[in-house]
Amino acid sequence: MKKVLFKIIKYAVLILFAVFIVYPVFVVVMSSFKTTAEIYQDTFGLPSKLNFSSYVTAWVNGNLSTYYVNSVIITFVSIFFVVVLASFASFAITREDCMFKKVLYGAFVAGISIPYQVGILPLYLQMSKLNLVNNRLGLILIYVAFGLPFSVFVMSGFFRTIPKDIEESAIIDGCNNYQIYAKIVVPLSPTVITTVVIFELVTIWNDMFFPLIFISSKDLRTIPIGLLSFKGEFISNYPAMFAGVVIASLPLIIAYLLLQKQFIEGLTAGAVKG
Amino acid sequence: MNKYSGDRVYWIIFIAPALLIVSLFFIIPVIGGFIYSLTDWNGLDKTINFIGLENYKNLILNNKRFYSALTHTLIFSFSITILQNCFGLILALVMDKNFKGRNFFRAVYYLPSVLSALVVSYAWSFILNPTMGALNVLFKKIGLNFLVQDWLGDAKLALFSIIFVVVWQYAGYSMVIYIAGLQNIPLEMYEASSIDGVNAWQKFRYITFPLLAPAFTINILLTMISTLKTFDHIFVMTKGGPGYATEVISTLLYRESFTNNNMGYGSAISVILFALITSVSLITLKYLRRRETAI
C-alpha cells in the first residue's frame, strides 16, 4: 500500500514538472495560431481555428525566409570547417612525431576557458579592417575560431584512445600519414564527430551575440537576430512573432526528438567546456 | 628510427589552418583586449594614449554602475547555481531508477536546453506580461491578487524573474549530468548498506551525496561560469532595465563598447569579467576537488 502511494506521488510530481516545462512551449505554439484579438481576449483559450496566416506574415513580411537561408548557410559551413580543421589539428597533436604537441594542445585548450566577450572589441576592429564586418564569411570565421578549441579538446581526447597497433599495421602496409588520417582515424570516429556536430549545431544556430555585433544589414541577419528585430517590427503582433519563434526552433526540436540520445550526449560533452 | 613513412612535417600541414584561424580571430583579439584596456582610446580617434591602470582604477574606485552590475552578476550567478543544482539533483534522484516512462520524462525535462535563449526569453516575457500574461491572469482568476506583479518591469523583481527563467531552461541539463554521476555509483554500496539496515536518508547522506562529488564539481563549475557571462536572456527580456536593475557585467560591457564607443573602458570591463570567471572557477575547483579527494 505504501509502495503504491509512493508511486502515485512520484508520477504526480513527474507529470506536474513535465507540464511546467511544456506549458511555455504550448503557449507559444497556440499563440502562433491565434488572431491578435484572441490573444488579448483570452490568454488561456485555444485558437478558434488553425490559422496559418501568421506563419505567412513571419515568413514573407518578416523576412524570415532570408534569415533562414543565412542561418542554414552560416551554420552548416561553419560546422563543416570546424569538424575538418579540428580533426586535422587533433590528428597532428596526437601523433608521436609531432613537435611541440603539448604546447599546441595547450594553446587550443586554453581557448575553452576564455569567455567569448574578452576580445570582442579588438576582434570587431580587426574584422572591420579586413572588410569582414557585415559579412557571412566573417561570421563563419568567428564561429570556426570559437568552435575549434572545444572541438580539438574532444576530438584529440578520442583520437588518443585509438589503439596504436592499428596505425602501425597500416604503416607496414605502406600507408602514409594522410592515408592513416583518411582511411583509419576518420572512419573510426563517427561518435566523436556527431558530438562535435551537435554541439556546434545548437551553439551556432542559437547564437545571438556575434550576429548582434557583426551583422547590421537586414539581408544578412541570421534567425535569432531576425527574431530580435521582430519585436520592433511587429509591435503587439504576437501571433507573427510566435510563428517566427516556432519556425526558428522547429528544426532543432525535430532533430532533438529524432536523435535524443546523441543530443544529450553531445551537449553534455559540452559540459567540460567552460 | 623514423617509423613513419614519408615526411615528418606533415603535422604542420594538418595543424596550420586551425592554428591560423584560432590565432587570428580568437587569441590575438584577446591579447588586444588586455592591451586596449591600458589605453584611453575611444575606438575612433587616431590618438591613443597609454594610461596604465587608469581604466581599472576608475572602474573599481568610482563607478557606481560597474558596482551595481557586479553585484547583480554575483546575485544572478549565485542564485542560479544553487537553484539549478538543487532542482537538477532532485530530478536526477527521482529519475535514477528505471521505471516506465523514464526516457519520456528525461526528454521533456531536457528539451529547453536545446532551445535558444532568445526563444525561451520571448515565451516567458509573454507569460510574465503584467496585463495579459498567463501568470497574472491565473493569479487574478484564483483570487491571489497580491501576487499580480509586473514581473519584468518592477526593479525589485526583474532580476529574480530572469533567474527563474534561466533555471527553468537549464535544470534538465544539470539533471542529465547528475544522472550520469548517479549511475557511476556501484550498486553494491547500496546493497551492502541495506543489509546494515540503513534508512533512505542515511543512504543519501553517506553514500549518494559523497560519491556524487565529481558530478557536483562539474555541474557547479559549469553553472557558475555560464551564468557569470550570461548576456542573451537579460538582453532580450529587460535589456538591463528597468533603469539599471538587471544590468550585469556582460550587458554593461556591450553598452560601453558598442553604444558608448568606450574602447579602453569596455576592454577593462571585459578583462575584469575574465579575471572574475577565472578566479571564481579556480577557487571553486580547488575547494570541490579537495572535497572529492577527501572522500
Image: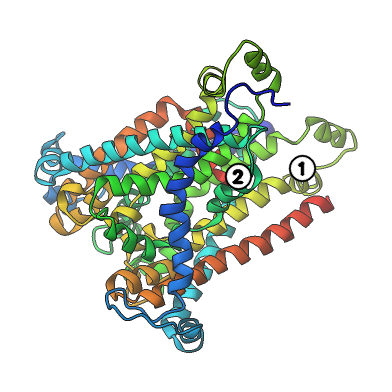
Mark number displayed over residue B200:
1
Q: Locate residue B109 relative to residue B142 in the image: left or right.
A: right
Mark number displayed over residue A105:
2
Q: Locate residue B221 relative to residue B36 in the image: left or right.
A: right
Which one is nearer the viewer's eye here, B229 or B42? Answer: B42
Name the image quarter holding residue A159: top right
Residue furthest to the top in view is: A173
At numbered mark 1, what does the secondary structure look like: helix, strand or loop?
Answer: helix
**CA separation, marks 1 and 2?**
46 Å
Residue furthest to the right in view is: B196
Q: Are marks 1 and 2 in contact (CB under 8 Å)?
A: no
The spot of residue B219 in percent (x, y) is 61, 50
Image quadrant containing the N terminus of chain A: top right
At numbered mark 2, what does the secondary structure look like: helix, strand or loop?
Answer: helix
User: Which mark's residue is nearer the viewer, 1 or 2?
Assistant: 2
User: Which amino acid type is shown beneath numbered disc 1?
Assistant: Ala
Which one is nearer the viewer's eye here, A71 or B125? Answer: A71
Q: Neighbour class for label 1 at 10 Å: few (<14), some, many (≥20)?
A: few
The answer to whether residue A72 shows anywhere in this view is yes
Q: Locate residue B82 relative to residue A230 in the image: left or right.
A: right
Q: Locate residue A28 relative to residue B114 in the image: left or right.
A: left
Q: Neighbour class for label 2 at 10 Å: few (<14), some, many (≥20)?
A: some
Picture layout, residue B223 above or below residue A83: below
Name the image quarter holding residue A7: top right
The residue under the point 53% across, 70% down is: B74
The residue under the point 50% across, 33% down is: A88
The residue under the point 20% across, 55% down is: A229
The answer to whether residue A19 shows anywhere in this view is no
User: Which amino acid type is shown beneath numbered disc 2?
Assistant: Tyr
The spot of residue B148 in percent (x, y) is 34, 66
Mark number displayed over residue A125:
none
Picture layout, residue B205 above or below residue A268: below
